[in-house]
Image (cartoon, rainbow, N blue to C red):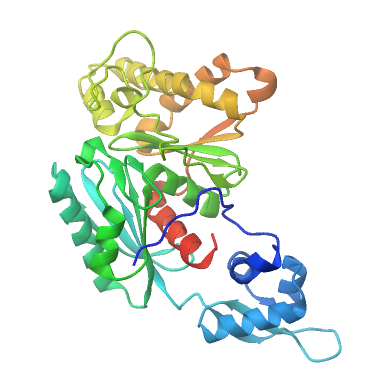
Amino acid sequence: MTTGFAAGRALRLTTKVLPEQARGHNRSLVLQTLYRAGQQSRADIARETGLTRVTISDLVAELIVDGLVVETGQREDARPGKPATLLDLNRSAFQIVGIDLSQYGVFRGAVLDLDGQILHRSEVAVAGSTGADATAKVLAIIASLVAEATLPILGIGVGSPGVVDLAGVVLSAPNLGWSGEPLQALAGERFGVPVVVANDANAAALAEHSFGDADSDMMLIKVGHGVGAGLLLNGNPLFGSRFAAGEIGHVVVGTDGGLDCVCGKRGCLETWLATPRLERALAGATTPQRKTDILREAGQRLGIALAPVVGALNLAEIVLSGPTELLDGPLAHATIETLRARTMAEFHGDLSLRMTTLGEDIVMRGAAVMVLSAQLGVS
């Protein structure tokens, strides 16, 4: 079984809709309210959502039968009358498998609970695998995690480098040798549960939105085997007409040549910033100052690539995700300096740039958000 990831849909539902659209939407609206707020009474949910108490009672009864909502007891209430019965999302109903294919050297995965907390981890060495060999390793790590799950699996989420369409086909991932790889369909057929495959940077942006308190207008830069970006505008993921929004790794930065890129061009951002390229450059540096210069130049190239995007979209926040020892410090400082030098201060002077607070688990937790959004309509 596979499931799509809806483009243009806000991650967090907040309002009711028209009757002909209502049932599924309002069901997700109840789940979203409980997911974010925790224990609530039926009256609390009605006030929060704007739905009638009759509608809430009907939806809650259905969700309890489906095992998605549980009654947790009565509220201790000083007011006269019968105390309200509290409800919560049944957080022990399911588990999620999240996979991160973005790292240089290893594929990583985890079993997570519905709150995005990691319960069990696994990883497998990439060891230069590409094409069918890489796909086999992805399916193997998923299988190992499915075997570790102690509850029914709500779904499997996979964050992959490259361009990924809404059907979970990896249209292009040069570093893994994939072109038109139907990863979502393959995993769905193999494991028989809902599967969502999306770009790793988009997954990371979703994690930052759900678990990292990111601004609703933000761009997350994911640095690993390659370089990509995830964009949220007004809380909506931006995919682009050909699913390549955020594919900044293969944008040529500057006119002074540069190293050959795996895509066939010279001087792509990835050649300056991708983890293996940056580590090799630093390994060849003979002095601390030379290492600082290499990091600053990589940050400047990133700032050059980002300035037109920040200017066009008036973003509030840039979040960096990747090896902290490489990104935090001279590289980040050079990036924000370059951005501010190349954009209008009155509109972009308060732009913030920071490291993610979610560390190396960000893509796996974002993969869990993709499953929660696709299956329950929550994030």
Residue at far front of view? 20
Give the position of the C terminus as an image quadrant. Answer: bottom right
Asked whether, in this view, residue 36 is left or right of residue 333, the answer is right
Q: How many marks?
A: 0
Residue at far right of view? 80
Q: Where 267 sits versus 316, above or below?
A: above
- Quarter of image, res 329: top left
In the image, 275 versus 202, the foreground residue is 202
- Give coordinates of residue 11: x percent, y percent: 56, 54
- Quarter of image, res 252: top left
- Give coordinates of residue 161: x percent, y percent: 32, 42
- Give the residue drawn at x 62%, y 29%: 314
- Give coordinates of residue 282: x percent, y percent: 26, 24
- Give coordinates of residue 245: x percent, y percent: 45, 36
Asked whether, in this view, residue 176 is left or right of residue 311, the answer is left
Q: Where 99 sits versus 309, above or below?
A: below
Do we see residue 102 in this rendering?
Answer: no
Do we see residue 153 in this rendering?
Answer: yes
- Give the residue drawn at x 42%, y 60%: 368
Asked whether, in this view, residue 137 is left or right of residue 191, the answer is left
Give the position of the N terminus as an image quadrant. Answer: bottom left
